[in-house]
Each structure stands twice: as C-alpha cells, then as structure tokens.
Amino acid sequence: MTAVNPYLDGNFAPVREEITADTLLVIGKLPLELSGIFVRTGSNPQWPPIGQYHWFDGDGMLHGVRISNGKATYRNRYVQTAGWKIERAAGKAIWTGLLEPPQMDNPYGLYKNTANTALVWHAGQLLALWEAGAPYAIQVPGLETIGEYTYNAKLTSAFTAHPKVDPVTGELLFFGYSPFTPPYLQYSVVSAQGELLRTVPIDLPIGVMMHDFAISENYTIFMDLPLTFCSERVQRGEPMLMFEKNRPSRFGILPRHGDNSNIRWFESPACFVPHTLNAYEEGDKVVLSGCRMKDSGLLEPIQSDEESDRPLYQWRFNLVSGTVQEQMLDDVPIEFPRVNEQLLGRKTRYGYTTRVANNPVLLFDALIKYDFLINKSETLEFGQERYGGDIVFVPRPGATVEDDGWILTLVHDENSATSELLVVNAQDVTSEPVARVLIPQRVPYGFHAAWISEEQLSSSV
C-alpha cells in the first residue's frame, strides 16, 4: 500500500472549484470600520502531481474575504500563470516538483512559476509572488489574473516572495537570488509610484536560498544563510539544495540606496531564518528579529520534531564594533511573524505570530501577541483540532496607538471540516473573537496573506 502524501490529504488537499459566495454567515459582529479584502494564497495543484509532491509545488490559489458594512463575501480563484495555462490546455501536470530531479528535457522549461507563495500591495497593484520568477498582477476585488508584472520590462532578476514596503517613503524594496550563476543576489528599489529605479548586484560566495530579508529606516538587511545550491552535488546524486551546518550564517547590512561596495557582513552560528518579524535602528546598532531554525527541513516532505525548533530570535549588529549579539526572545516555536506594517522598519512595541503545533506536519494551533516593552506574551488558542495560518494586522482607521486594530486569520476546524475567517481584537487577543466569518467551502492550509484596505481598493490601477 502506498503511503498518502500528507500535503495532498485532509485540509492540505486541493479544492478545484472556483466559487463566489455572497452574504456569508457571521458569528459575532464585523466592525463597521473594518472595510477591505483579506486575501490568502497557497499551493493548490490543479492536476495530480508527477512523482513526489512537495507542499511548495502546487499552483497558486487566492482566497478572498471581502468585508464591507458589516457583511462579508468570499471568492477563490487560481492564479492563471503561463504554466497553469499550459497544463490546463494539456489536461495534466507537465512539470515535476522540488523533490524530483530537474526535467532537462521539458520543452516548456525546467520549472513552473506557480505564483503561490505570498502577496504584496504596492502602487495601486496587488502582486502574487513566487521567489524564483516574476510576480503576477491580480485584479481586486475580483482576484482575476492580469498577467506577468515586469515593471515595463525593467525586471531582470527573480522577485522575492517577501518584498518590503516602507510605510514612510512608500518605496518597495526587493531582491532576487540565483541558485547557480552569479550574481547570486540582486537588489532593487521601486519608487512609491511603482517605477523600478535601480537594480544592483551583491556578491555572495555561493548561491543560497534567501527566502526573506528585512529593512530598517536607513538599511536593508540580507541573510546569507547556509542553505546552499550546488550543481556538483546534483551530479553526484546528492540534493541540489542542502543545509551546510559547518558554514556560518552571514548577515549583510547595506545602506538602502547603497551597492556592493558599502555592504557590511556580520557572521553568526549556522541557522536558517524562514521569516523576519522586523528590523530597526537603535543608536549604533541595527536590531533584527525573526523566526530561527537550527537547520532547515524545507525539502523534507514531513517535518521532524527536531526541525520544529522555531523560536522568536533577535540579532543586534553593532555598526561601530562589528560585533553581533543574539538571543532567544521566546522558546515557543512560531511562524508567520508580523507587525503593524505602518511601522515596518521602525521599533515596535508589539509583534504577532502563529504558534507551531506539535504535529508531524506543519500546522499552527494558536495566535500569539508579543509585548516587547514588558516582555510578555498573550496566546489565543484556536481550539481542539482547529488550525490557522498567516495573520495580518489591520489598523483601525484613525488609530493613535500601535495595537488599535484587528488580527485576521483563516482557521480550519478538522472536526467539522469547515473553514472560517477569525477577526480578533488586537488589544484583547485572549477574549472571544470579535467575529467569525464562515466560509461556504473548505479553504486548504496555505501560505501568506495580505489585507487591502477600502482606500487601497479605490486606488487600484
């Protein structure tokens, strides 16, 4: 008997029907000031996979909950990438995934841009992201795919799944990494109006997987971590991507508008940082926090206990002495760290994360709010056999304090096989959610989410 891949089973299994549902049932009351659309993306293969399937392989699918005047609607749509269209026409999968050898003879190319990983709103446009290719532009609130977005053909690198938008300048900062050919890292700045202004190469000794990065008010922080690509390994029948625990982690701090000549590198013990929470400047120091793993289980089909070690961690880089101090902020395994993004790159009092469940597959069983001023945390558990995902903080319009707003996340109940959007008062996370929006179709577990406000929707291009 063949074992079922857990990432194709239960609530990881894809939903193939695209629906539009009006007037969703709401338990509790949606705040009238909460107006916009919550969109979450994820991996949703439209055809049975070829060979071994990894959770990251599936086609992108967007799930949108539109909230307005205390009411909610839902729709889900595939991101219709070039690869999705080719496989749609063929009626079957054409590309293999991360766990299979590269298809050197695939007439359509080695890999498929699935646009399944994350979302960013910038300059009036929602982009669906996949870090090894170009973004895809998405219409809102309908979630139809417009097409590849290449900044008027100025995009010359891949585009990270985690670009950063500076809330003060409006700039979007992104990078692209190359596995096998220099420059292994390219860094780009986009103006508040959406013009790609510059792309500069950054020297790395070898190609590495660089999933996330961070910005502070004046600096951009890159992470050259020992999750390396190596073509020689492939020729020996070893993995293309491997964690090299004997290599140090390197953190590069670059003035925002600088280039390779002004980057400074700091070394620390080997680790992998899947996601950063934030970075900020404090005197002569740049302070970075994020989710730290001892190594990386990214290409293991099932996560082992050892790899679930994901505490919230902090690094302090002294720009005068060149030294690094690091410390664990909390020993609870966490993921999907977020701050109030109106303060991204500045020191924040609060951070929000999900808690990793004690489970052989990657599930999240609670929401945590951190108060860094008094070093305390509060936890909202989703309930027995209830699991959530990426969270967004939505500031209340006109708010004057950092945590005045709501935390939104999709939660799935394994017992009833139903999905819902939780709306939590960010100032009182441990009380009952303000509202639970019931979704009329199962929403598979997925990746990252975004909130597009009513004001942003009205400015969409």
Image (tube, rainbow, N blue to C red):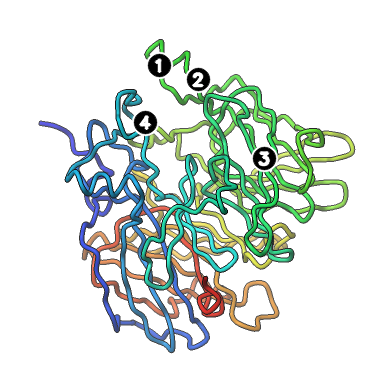
First in residue order: circle 4 vs circle 1: 4
> Which residue is located at x 19 percent, y 43 percent?
90
Q: Pinpoint residue 137: horizontal percent, then vertical percent.
A: 46, 59
Q: Is residue 301 above or below residue 330?
A: above
Q: Pinpoint residue 239: horizontal percent, then vertical percent.
A: 41, 21
Q: Amino acid at mark 3?
A: Phe
Q: Which mark is residue 110?
A: 4
- Residue position marked by numbered label 2 in the rendering: 230
Residue furthest left as drawn: 1
Q: Helix, strand, or loop for circle 3?
A: strand
Q: Nearer the viewer, mark 2 or mark 1?
A: 2
- Residue position marked by numbered label 3 in the rendering: 222
| Mark 1: few/some/many CA within 10 Å (<14, 14-19, 20+) | few
Q: Amino acid at mark 4?
A: Leu
First in residue order: circle 4 vs circle 2: 4
Q: Is residue 74 above or below residue 153?
A: below
Q: Pinpoint residue 97: horizontal percent, then vertical percent.
A: 32, 34
Q: Helix, strand, or loop for circle 4?
A: loop
Q: Is residue 45 left or right of residue 365?
A: left
